[in-house]
Image (cartoon, coloured by chain):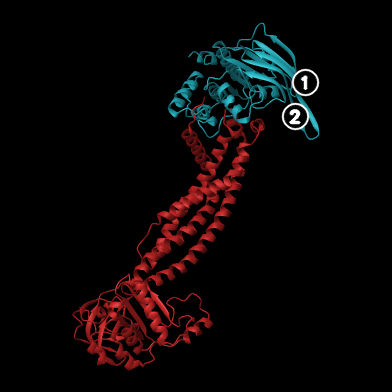
Chain colours: A red, B cyan
């Protein structure tokens, strides 16, 4: 008997909501500030993490494809108490012959590389000198592949460099550029801590992570490093599988070999760490998960507080507009219409705060990310979640005031001054 | 069939430990097109009767048939619909939405009736033009004089083409000249066949009606035809000429 025109009703309620919010600008802005802060805090964290994550994960491809690495210490330590550090320090080191044993026994492995970060210092050419922050690494020829180093110019190491422990070097892109700005470094000499090395190769640049260049290093044969720095130098052994499909088997085989070599009794945990690109990314995600969860908790608390603020202001609004409610009821508004109007007002109030919070959060999150040299991101999913949460807050905290408004006695309301 | 049939209508209010008998059994029949004044001193029960007639309230007991439908025991939702469709209210203090312009105020009942917006606009414009405010459609209440506000309220009451116009002290907040103007408007509406019920305590206002019902202590004390209803004074820009349409 009656045409239901929901759209009309919603539009009326929406117009009235905007009207009512605009009529009390200061009050409305203070109320939506709470929502704004809650949404802002979650969006800024999510944006920053998203921006960093993309960057870090691409940079975490430090190892070659289908490659894993054995080392004494975990790649990322979350707990930093000395007790757990002791556990790692008590572990046996990796020695150069271990790599040979693995190479010999690991039938599934394509190649086994060895590398070590032996020292840090300044490198000099006959033209210039670098900052004293250049990493001095030792590597076996296989490690170029397992560590994803590609040679831009010249050659990697060969077997005779190893067997002769020769003083040859491959330069990281930044070091080559710094020391030889005008020409090719190939055939030139560089000097590190008083020893001269003949440059045989230059690597492709790897870019930067967390604003730090990843190309500030020089590489010499691992045997040269061991001669100079001693057999006790902490080594990393990297194993590349033939393909993704045999990767798990390869990993298990190498694990078994290493346990046998290091005499780990059956049933005890490994006394070494195995890291891969995946395990690094996974660990990174675990850490950021904690940050995200923290941000989520803070945002939830802020949003509940903000919701209470909204409820408070809506209750005031209902009291102030008792007369209006009476008029609307007298001319035919049902309880449902009044409910819709006031809930929508709470939702609109909440959404305005939410939208501003999302915009500011994305801007601030990207600024934080930009400070660490990462490209900007727009987290659509979180923006939508933010809007949805705002609606939920508006509905959750607007319902009681709206219910109160709808259940006012029309006669009493009309008489209200 | 009469427009309104009321039989033995009572309304009690419980206030703490005390029960107030506002209406003690009112029986009344109103025909379509009547112009009625309901009179009575304060506390007589006339406001209660008006609230019941206007479907703002439900009786404690009794029978109320409006336009062939028993509305005595309807629930809140149905009453809202009846108010929307059958009753146009005009209040003493105008009761317009302060932040909305005349047009929107007049459109409001149509919004709740669920009319599409073009139709709404058209009817609201017509209603405002009929009360002589065609040039004040986008003025807010605070930009209008008291008489103009009351005319907006009358336009709002009429826009849905209701069965009854129910006016509660419609001239109470107006000076006598403007009050006459509004009463002139009612007369014109009555001549056009609208049913008008004016609730008032002013004898002068009541004298414009063709039937006067006097309430006292919750009962009808007198219900008589007014032999010579007073005609509203005519003004150059008065109400009568404006309801020509």
Q: Residue at x 55, y 33 (%)?
A: B98
Residue on which the image places disc 2: B13
Q: What's the mark number on residue A74?
A: none
Alpha-carbon span between mark 1 and mark 2: 14 Å
Q: Position of residue B40 (x, y in %)?
A: 73, 19
- Residue in the foreground of this view, choosing between A51 and B133: A51
In the drawing, does residue B26 fall left or right of residue A155? right
Q: For mark 2, name the chain.
A: B
Please identify the residue farthest to the top as the structure is shown.
B227
Q: Residue at x 57, y 45 (%)?
A: A398
Q: Taking the image as drawn, is residue A121 in sight? A: no
Q: For mark 1, name the chain.
A: B
In the figure, residue A235 lies in which quadrant? bottom left
Q: What's the mark number on residue B217?
A: 1
- Residue in the foreground of this view, choosing between A209 and A237: A237
Q: Taking the image as drawn, is residue B6 in sight? A: yes
């Amino acid at each position: 008997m009656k045409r239901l025109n929901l759209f009309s009703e919603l539009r009326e309620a929406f117009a009235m909501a905007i009207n009512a919010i605009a009529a009390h600008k200061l009050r409305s802005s203070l109320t939506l500030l709470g929502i704004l802060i809650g949404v802002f805090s979650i969006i800024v964290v999510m944006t920053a993490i998203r921006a960093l994550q993309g960057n870090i994960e691409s940079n975490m491809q430090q190892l070659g494809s289908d490659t894993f690495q054995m080392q004494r210490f975990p790649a990322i330590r979350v707990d930093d108490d000395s007790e757990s550090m002791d556990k790692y320090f008590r572990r046996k080191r990796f020695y150069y012959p271990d790599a040979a044993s693995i190479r010999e026994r690991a039938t599934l492995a394509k190649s086994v590389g060895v590398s070590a970060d032996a020292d840090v210092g300044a490198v000099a050419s006959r033209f210039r000198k670098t900052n004293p922050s250049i990493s001095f690494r030792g590597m076996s020829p296989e490690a170029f592949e397992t560590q994803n180093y590609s040679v831009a110019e010249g050659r990697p190491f060969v077997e005779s460099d190893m067997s002769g422990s020769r003083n040859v070097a491959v330069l990281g892109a930044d070091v080559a550029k710094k020391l030889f700005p005008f020409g090719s470094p190939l055939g030139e000499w560089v000097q590190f801590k008083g020893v001269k090395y003949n440059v045989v190769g230059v690597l492709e640049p790897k870019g930067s992570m967390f604003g730090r260049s990843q190309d500030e290093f020089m590489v010499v044969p691992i045997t040269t490093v061991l001669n100079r720095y001693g057999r006790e130098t902490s080594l990393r052994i990297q194993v590349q599988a033939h393909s993704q499909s045999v990767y798990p088997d390869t990993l298990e085989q190498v694990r078994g070999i290493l346990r046998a070599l290091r005499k780990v009794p059956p049933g005890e945990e490994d006394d070494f760490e195995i890291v891969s690109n995946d395990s690094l990314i996974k660990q990174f995600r675990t850490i950021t998960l904690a940050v995200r969860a923290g941000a989520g908790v803070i945002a939830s608390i802020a949003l509940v507080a903000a919701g209470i603020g909204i409820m408070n202001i809506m209750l005031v609004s209902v009291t102030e507009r008792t007369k209006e409610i009476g008029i609307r009821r007298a001319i035919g508004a049902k309880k449902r219409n009044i409910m819709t109007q006031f809930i929508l007002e709470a939702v609109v109030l909440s959404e305005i705060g939410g939208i501003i919070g999302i915009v500011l959060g994305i801007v601030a999150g990207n600024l934080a990310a930009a400070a660490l040299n990462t490209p900007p991101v727009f987290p659509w999913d979180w923006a939508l979640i933010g809007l949805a949460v705002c609606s939920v807050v508006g509905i959750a905290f607007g319902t009681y005031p709206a219910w109160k408004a709808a259940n006012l006695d029309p006669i009493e309301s009309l008489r209200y001054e | 069939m009469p427009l309104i049939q009321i039989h033995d209508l009572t309304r009690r209010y419980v206030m703490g430990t005390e029960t107030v008998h506002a209406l003690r059994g009112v029986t009344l029949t109103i025909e379509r097109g009547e112009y009625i004044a309901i009179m009575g001193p304060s506390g007589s029960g006339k406001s209660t009767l008006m609230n019941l007639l206007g479907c703002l309230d439900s009786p404690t007991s009794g029978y109320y048939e409006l336009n062939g439908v028993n509305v005595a025991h309807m629930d809140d939702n149905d009453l809202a619909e009846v108010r929307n469709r059958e009753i146009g209210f005009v209040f003493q203090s105008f009761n317009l939405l302060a932040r909305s312009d005349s047009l929107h105020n007049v459109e409001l009942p149509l919004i709740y009736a669920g009319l599409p917006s073009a139709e709404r606009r058209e009817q609201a414009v017509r209603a405002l033009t009929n009360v002589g405010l065609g040039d004040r459609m986008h003025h807010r209440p605070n930009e209008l004089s008291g008489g103009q506000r009351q005319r907006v309220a009358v336009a709002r009451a009429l826009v849905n083409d209701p069965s009854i116009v129910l006016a509660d002290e419609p001239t109470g907040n107006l000076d006598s000249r403007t009050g006459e103007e509004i009463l002139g408007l009612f007369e014109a509406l009555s001549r056009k066949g609208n049913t008008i019920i004016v609730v008032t305590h002013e004898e002068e206002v009541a004298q414009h009606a063709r039937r006067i019902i006097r309430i006292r202590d919750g009962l009808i004390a007198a219900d008589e035809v007014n032999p010579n209803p007073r005609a509203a004074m005519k003004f150059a820009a008065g109400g009568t000429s404006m309801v020509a349409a």
